[in-house]
Image: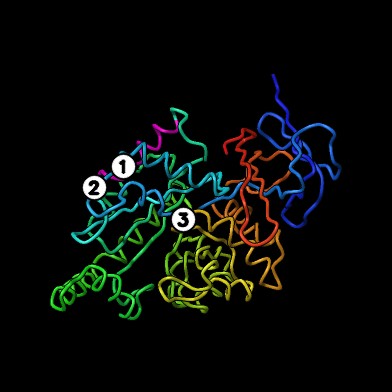
Amino acid sequence: MSSEQVLTNARIVLEDDIVEGSVLIRDGRIADISERTSRVGEDVEGDYLLPGLIELHTDHLEAHYSPRPGVRWLKIAAIQAHDAQVVTSGITTVFDCLRLGSDEESGFPKGEMRSMADALAQAKAEGRLRADHLIHLRCEVSTNDVLEHFEDFHDDPQVRLVSLMDHAPGQRQFQTMDQYTLYYKTKRGLTDEAFAAFVERQQALSERYAAPHRTALAQACVKRGITIASHDDATLAHVEESIGYGVRLAEFPTSFEAAEASHRAGLSVLMGAPNVVRGKSHSGNIAARDLAERGVLDVLSSDYVPFSLIHAPFILADEVESIDLPNAIALVTATPARTVGLSDRGRIAVGLRADIVRVHRPEGIPVVRSVWREGRRVA
């Protein structure tokens, strides 16, 4: 037996236009888009209807699972808390980041992230989750055990995205020592001697492991059809290397040169939505808004603040002359969907999944009023 519902009196944000009218949902899919107000259905009172947001890079699950150093929360409870926050931010598809590769200073021991992936699968099977959860493996290529950690996921269909990262000093995000000192010395209270030893060790690990691990991971992803992301590319050489590995997503490039080269090469350039909201990077790198003004910003990620993903597009539409609201919303819907091969979502279009967000925005910060995933009200 088929089911139908109508959302009417709406401003419908299509990929290249905004129309006033109604959306017909049938059996979890978008069946019709009409530029007329229907006498039946749910009156959304002139609010926007957007495609469900698609989040490719969020560390937010980790914050719920390990809310304090040394504390581990119950995995299912952490997942449900994370799920509730992303859905009420308008996110209907989320790629949860799981960190692979560890040393004595950071990361999780082997098996812990595999256990989290199993908990995600269990939560899905038990109908606990409102968003569609997939997995993004953040692989620290300069650690000695990253390939062993990756092997835990060799047959997991939840894994759809892998990023290749190297956070060693002198590399990519930390080309200068100022920010690295703040992250790893000041915040952790290391003495000068302890910090110097830490830096030396991290540089040695990167020199030994980064290149062979990057190659091995990229080859495995190509074989399995997993989308590859670069991370913190800073130079043209980094971009050329990424292109050679088959990278499709350029996460957080740290220079205009790298961002523009990535975009020209057909990679989707991803920056943080918090960067847009704050007007600057938390780590002192380039501003996402500047990339948007240059026309080389393709995807936004909420990174560490889920609600920023619905907030940032409205800021860009308000403040960047070359970006209208459909262009801005595509940064968090259509383009991320295409980048990772999700052809069934990311737009309000006939035949696609009815992942839809109702947003009220008289001025300033938007309000998420309702969320549907595959036609089912989830928030």
Amino acid type at circle 3 is His
The boundaries of the magenta stretch are 110-124
Left or right: 13 as drawn, with respect to 203: right
Left or right: 347 as drawn, with respect to 133: right
From the image, tell me which residue sits under label 1: 114
- Does the magenta-highlighted stretch encompass residue 122? yes
Q: Which mark is residue 179?
A: none
Residue 83: x and y in percent read 46, 42
User: Would you say the residues marked 1 and 2 are in contact, meaning their CB atoms lie under 8 Å apart?
Assistant: yes
What is the spatial separation of the Cα atoms under label 1 and label 2, in whole angstroms? 8 Å
User: Would you say the residues marked 1 and 3 are in contact, meaning their CB atoms lie under 8 Å apart?
Assistant: no
Residue at 43% x, 27% y is 126
Residue 234: x and y in percent read 43, 75
Depth check, front residue: 316 or 106: 316
Residue at 25% x, 61% y is 143
Residue 286: x and y in percent read 49, 76
From the image, tell me which residue sits under label 3: 57
| Image vertical order of residue 91 relative to residue 119, above or below | below
Amino acid type at circle 2 is Lys
Q: Earlier in the sequence, mark 2 or mark 3?
A: 3
Left or right: 264 as drawn, with respect to 159: right
> Does dot 2 land on a helix, a strand or a loop?
loop
Residue 354: x and y in percent read 66, 38
Amino acid type at circle 1 is Arg
Closer mark to the observer between disc 1 and disc 3: 3
Closer mark to the observer between disc 2 and disc 3: 3
What is the spatial separation of the Cα atoms under label 1 and label 3, in whole angstroms? 18 Å
Residue 230 position by quadrant: bottom left
From the image, tell me which residue sits under label 2: 110
Q: Residue furthest top?
A: 1
Residue 33 position by quadrant: top right
